[in-house]
Image (cartoon, helix red, strand yellow):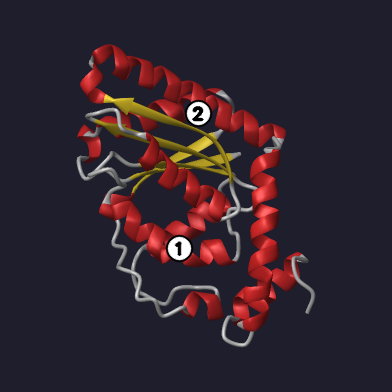
Amino acid sequence: MKIIAIQSSPKRKNSNTLKLVEAALEGAREAGAETELIDITRLKINFCKGCVTCYRDGTCHQKDDYNALKKKILEADGIILSSPNYIDNITAQLKVFFDRSANFIHEQLLDGKYGLSITTSGSGNNDFVLGIMNHFINATGGLAVGSVGCGMGQGPAAFESGIKKSRESGKELARAIKEKRAYPDQAAAHRDWKEHFAMTLRRNKDNWKHNYECWVEKGWIKA
């Protein structure tokens, strides 16, 4: 069982969000997972060009670190997404990765995988940022196990509580993977989306060749 964590704070080792992520990874290891931390701010990931080559060929042809990161995620059983709250949003570094990952949605590349989201803020206004990351997990076919948000302005006790919750959430993520835990509401949303997207895919099957072949192979659509 492998869990990948992505840290996206430009503060890197000085990031409070990173400290929560490290606690979550510690918890995951205690529950039996192999873990890896990836600092996306140290990678070269270019802006998405909107060329939709990934829909046609299944890969992005830009020469940067994106495809290597994608491979690590696809080889993992779980993913932890993290970002500090920057003007009520995720960091630019994480947003660029999401933009490049539209094909994760079209081909539901996190299908069968589980995820957790983590953020910190000064004000404690965390729900929107956590929602962005959990939406990415759900929109790409994954199951969101939970989320952790910490308002640093609430003082040291709040941060210590965030560390503890992160560690427990990491354990819970690992347990969900081991148990192949079901989340009926999220699974129902996935089914509804597939039913809707199948119509779009049929209309675009000549231009989105890889997408179409992927769905046929997985049995989600009949050729």
Q: CA distance from mark 1 to mark 2?
A: 24 Å
Binning the other alpha carbons within 10 Å of mark 1 as few (below 14), some (14 to 19) or many (20 upward) gives: many
Binning the other alpha carbons within 10 Å of mark 2 as few (below 14), some (14 to 19) or many (20 upward) gives: many
**Residue linked to disc 1:** 101
Q: Which callout, 1 or 2, points at the residue further toward the start of the chain?
A: 1
Left or right: 63 in relation to 214: left
Local secondary structure at mark 1? loop
Q: Going 48% across and 51% down the picture, which residue do you hit?
A: 136
Q: Going 60% across and 60% down the picture, which residue do you hit?
A: 108
Q: Going 79% across and 74% down the picture, which residue do you hit?
A: 222
Q: Going 69% across and 70% down the picture, which residue do you hit?
A: 215
Q: Quadrant of residue 20?
A: top left
Mark in front: 1 vs 2:
1
**Residue linked to disc 2:** 170
Q: State the residue in front, 159 or 129.
A: 129
Q: Position of residue 176 (x, y in %)?
A: 64, 32
